[in-house]
Amino acid sequence: MKREGIFQKIKSIFKENEIDTENLQLSHQLGSGLLRIDSVKFMKLMVDLENEFDIELDYRDTFGQDNTLEELIDYIEEKYAS
């Protein structure tokens, strides 16, 4: 799957989870700022992403103040390649 397709799917899942995607940028940090979410929404988002991409996400590698949306896309791309 191409990078842009992954990004569009992530944006769609974020919208479904009531996360604003209007100004979404690859440099945004997951779990803070624009992408700050509560723990319940976080769990639902993780499950939705796993179901959409048919992968298992390790939240330590994909979410946190040091992780960006671009790193999440890289992680998903890597999972597809393996």
Image (tube, helix red, strand yellow):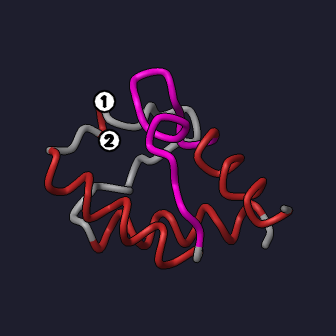
Residue 53 in the image: state x and y as whole percent.
Answer: 58, 74
| Viewport quadrant of the N terminus | bottom right
Q: Is residue 79 left or right of residue 31?
A: right
Q: Residue at x 53, y 34 (%)?
A: 68
Q: Where 81 falls versus 1 (above or below)?
A: above
| Depth order, front residue of 35/81 | 81
Q: Residue at x 25, y 38 (%)?
A: 36
Q: Amino acid at mark 2?
A: Leu
User: Crowding near pointer 1: few (<14 within 10 Å), some, many (20+)?
Assistant: some
- Taking the view exactly as shown, the residue that stands out farthest to the right is 81
Q: Say which element carries label 1.
A: loop
The magenta segment: 55-70
Q: Which residue is mark 1?
A: 32
User: Crowding near pointer 2: few (<14 within 10 Å), some, many (20+)?
Assistant: some
Q: Is residue 13 left or right of residue 40?
A: right
Q: Which residue is mark 2?
A: 35
**Residue 8, image quadrant:** bottom right
Q: How many marks?
A: 2
Q: Is residue 28 left or right of residue 70?
A: left
Q: Say which element carries label 2.
A: helix
Q: Where 63 falls versus 43 (above or below)?
A: above
Residue 55 in the image: state x and y as whole percent.
Answer: 59, 68
Gap between marks 2 and 1 measured at Cα = 5 Å
Tags 2 and 1 in contact by the CB under 8 Å rule? Answer: yes
| Viewport quadrant of the C terminus | bottom right
Q: Inspect the magenta stretch and tell me whether residue 37 lies in it.
A: no
